Image (cartoon, rainbow, N blue to C red):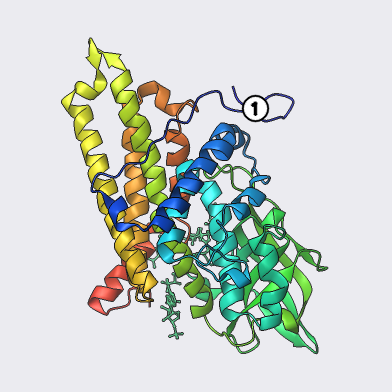
Amino acid sequence: MLANNNGTIEKRAREDRFQGHDYYNIDELLSEEHLLARDAVRDWVKKEVSPVIEAYAEKAECPTHLFKGLAEIGAFGPSLPVEYGGGGMDEIAYGVIMQELERGDSGIRSMASVQGSLVMYPIFKFGSEEQKRKYLPKLGSGDFIGCFGLTEPDHGSNPGGMITNIKDDGDAYILNGAKMWITNSPVADLAVVWAKDEEGKIRGMVVEKDTPGFSAPEIHGKWSLRASITGELVFEDVRVPKENVFPEIRGLKGPLSCLSKARYGIAWGAIGAAMDCYDSALRYSLEREQFGKPIGGFQLTQKKLAEMITEITKAQLLAWRLGTLANKGKATPAQISMAKRNNVNMALEIAREARQIHGGMGITNEYPVMRHMMNLETVLTYEGTHDIHLLITGMDVTGLNAFK
Ligand code: TGC
Ligand code: FAD
């Protein structure tokens, strides 16, 4: 047992023995900066995340104390400029950082994805100079926590149908509506919110926590991403000062371009979850004996492990190539969709196979695989579902739009 009856969180006794896996010497494709960033985050995850994550997941509590540490290791906006609170690194550095965080837990990676790619990035990309100066340094340092409100109760895969709206009222807009499934919303100091104006055009804005009429109730009962906090955003005649609205951007391409940034990070992150499951399964298969020999000696176990490392290697190459394209500003949204879809599905399949290799122990919190497996069910759905990304690829290769 990890969670006490008195509500405190105990540290996990089991040592985190994770080792990275690099079957195709992909490290040779990474720079010294990439390797340093990756190893620093790997060490931080071993020290700060692994000892507590099972207990937080079991209690369905978010380890909010980790926000500050995430800021210190540069996990918020690694590829955004330093002067705006980012890390000033490239897209591959951003990718390997997400990989290591999700190796710890998809919910921890989510904390960083939302803050960096869905809150800091839109303010950086679409905000006025005043908005950037006011919010970005505090978001980068973890003094402010942000969330991103796009999804609504009746508009998930089809955000263009949103009904949350703003009406002009002199020096402010009046915001009404509701957002659903919003990561970090109950603990956020501010929300980046997307709403339709009176012409029906989608606009983005920053809504601060204490604004009258704004609330963010928590959603309970999740069996997935339990160490991440999720909530609603409710707006009842909320006065949003005009200076909080992004000045230029109009239309769905605003929020969708933020999603491209976050989906890219997830394509890398999922490799981390897959590697942790493979790493645990490989070790277990060598230590666990049945019929007088290690279960890793049976052909059926070897088939599982061989297929896992093959799929991980393919996903690593896909992510690395996507990163080199992103560094040149050439990664298309459809290429990002392909990598998000492939790599998350790969990780989920590996988590299921790894769970089988662990036998009965695989369903317990002695091993990380069941937690990763449950988390990945969310990762398969958020930031565009598995099937939505397939249809984006289908549209790209045929030129025919299945959504309309
Ligand atoms: P459509 O007409 O295709 O596009 C509208 C405009 O947007 C442009 N566009 C993009 N721009 C940048 N990046 C992308 N990925 C883009 N995709 C499209 C497009 O070119 C067009 O521009 P313009 O200039 O012509 O106006 O829009 P549609 O209404 O037909 O929708 C297409 C569809 C279904 C692909 C899109 O709506 C979609 O991706 N749906 C999935 C929704 C989604 O991913 N929601 C995620 C919510 S946030 C979240 O889950 C955070 S989880 C965070 C965590 O905890 O980690
Ligand atoms: P729906 O859109 O109702 O889809 C249900 C099913 O129908 C899916 O299988 C889907 O693939 C399928 N479907 C839909 N349309 C089509 C079609 N045209 N063709 C074929 N199949 C289709 N959103 C945010 O804005 N911010 C957040 O921070 C955020 N965090 C989240 C955290 C968690 C834990 C979860 C679970 C979700 C989060 N989301 C967030 C919302 C997430 O992006 C949506 O759940 C997702 O986009 C899918 O929307 P939906 O759940 O309404 O499903």
Q: Residue at x 47, y 53 (%)?
A: 37
Q: Residue reaching furthest left?
A: 299
Quarter-of-image position of residue 33:
bottom left
In the image, residue 55 sits, relative to residue 69, either above or below, namely above
- Residue 119 located left or right of residue 8: left
| Amino acid at circle 1 | Glu
Q: Is mark 1 within 8 Å of ligand 2?
A: no
Q: x%, y% of residue 135? A: 70, 70
Residue situated furthest right in the rendering? 212
Residue 380 appears in the figure? no
| Total numbered circles | 1
Q: Nearer the viewer, residue 186 or 29?
A: 29
Quadrant of ligand 1 in image = bottom left
Q: Is residue 390 left or right of residue 154?
A: left
Residue found at x 50% / y 66%: 79
Can residue 201 be seen here? Answer: yes
Between 188 and 203, the one nearer to me in the picture: 188
Q: Position of residue 269 (x, y in %)?
A: 43, 52
Specify whether 356 is left or right of 210.
left
Instruction: Report x, y in % for residue 402.
Output: 33, 73
Q: Indicate whether 233 appears above or below 373.
A: below
Say which quarter of the image contains residue 128: bottom right
Dividing the image into 4 quarters, which one contains the N terminus?
top right
- Residue at the extreme front: 32
Residue hosting label 1: 10
Give how far across and how far down residue 398 sits, in percent.
23, 76
Question: Up-down: is 82 above or below 228?
Answer: below
**Helix, strand or loop at mark 1:** loop
Q: Residue at x 50, y 43 (%)?
A: 105
